[in-house]
Amino acid sequence: MSFVDEVTSARKSRRLRWRDMSKLKKHEAKWGYVFISIWVIGFLAFYLIPMVASFAFSLLDFQLAKPGEIEFIGFEHWRRMLFEDELVWTSMRVTFVFALITLPIGMFVSLGLAILLNSEHLIGRDMFRTLFYMPSMIPLIASIFIWSGVLNSQSGWLNRLIEFTTGYPAVGLNGLRWLDSPNLIYIALTYIGIWGVGNAIIINLAGLQSVPTDLYEAARVDGANWFRRLWSITIPMISPVIFYNLVLGLVGLLQYFIVPYILNGGNGYPENTTRFYMIHFFTNAFGYADMGYGAALAWLMFIVGMLITLALFGSARYWVYYEAESN
């Protein structure tokens, strides 16, 4: 049977199924199409059509300062982006170096705190859960200004605390310049990121509370210690939650923009260590008003992010445990 015959046969079978349906089922099906049409319209209006339009912009010489001089130039922006613009690869390297530093730390801290807050031996668990979640409720801009004061080399309380407790001269121009030193800036940005791990803690906590308690009881009977129970029961059972946080964290870091932009205006200070990819995209698209080149930059990050996400999903079958699939 040819492909055309298969399509024709499938259409006939659908028409027959529709005729065989009762009036009640047809009524329910129509309402189902009505409700799903809301999502379809939203997907088309806010996702698919803008994506297609942005790809079309990447093929045009489209500058906001010259809206009447739009010209089709094909893949010229792509050639410039891949082979001429050195800042593309510099910003890409900065983004991935920072992601490799802060993503494992953030996931480890959020999971560790969730395990601590899930302990039955912790006094005042509800209070501590609230306290750890509260920073994520503070607007990000306000948090950045708070941390810029905390990490100030002259008046920041973190340097004063280090100097008071260790005797190390952390305060002053020769001290720990968190936001001015290329060797310390990523640590400072990681501090700011950890400040807002409340959402990840809540997600991990929900995963921990869904682990069947009978598994722990059986492990205790077999003589498994706390670390063995954590490694052999807790981690495998919450691996879908860990995977979820991993994907969200990686996508968020690929779009990392607001913190470095607020701290130094997106100029890459110090020594281009904060010239993240989204900073480079924003500078070209809105700073230079070159929407065509900005669209090409956006599509490059989309492709890179999609490839990494597909690789993660491909690797998930080797380390992510789904109870439903095991059944």
Image (tube, grey):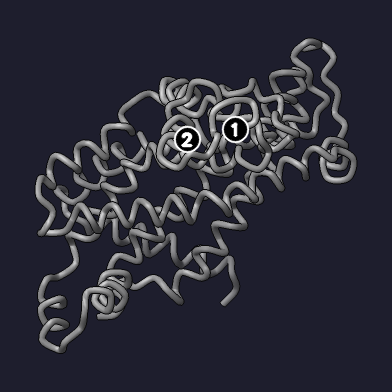
Residue at left 42%, top 74%? 319
Locate residue 82: give its quadrant. Answer: top right
Helix or strand or loop: what does disc 1 sit on? loop
83 or 53, which is in the foreground? 83
Tell me the residue that label 2 is attached to.
163
Q: Is residue 239 above or below residue 193?
A: below
Q: Amino acid at mark 2?
A: Glu
Kindly indicate whether the residue at mark 1 contacts the one at mark 2 (C-beta within 8 angstroms).
yes
Q: Is residue 309 above or below residue 223?
A: above
211 or 188, which is in the foreground? 188
Residue at left 29%, top 38%? 35
Whether residue 99 sits left or right of residue 64 in the image: it is left
Tell me the residue that label 1 is attached to.
175
Q: Is residue 111 above or below residue 173?
A: below
Whether residue 220 sits left or right of residue 2 in the image: it is left
Q: Quadrant of the C terminus?
A: bottom left
The CA span between labels 2 and 1 is 9 Å
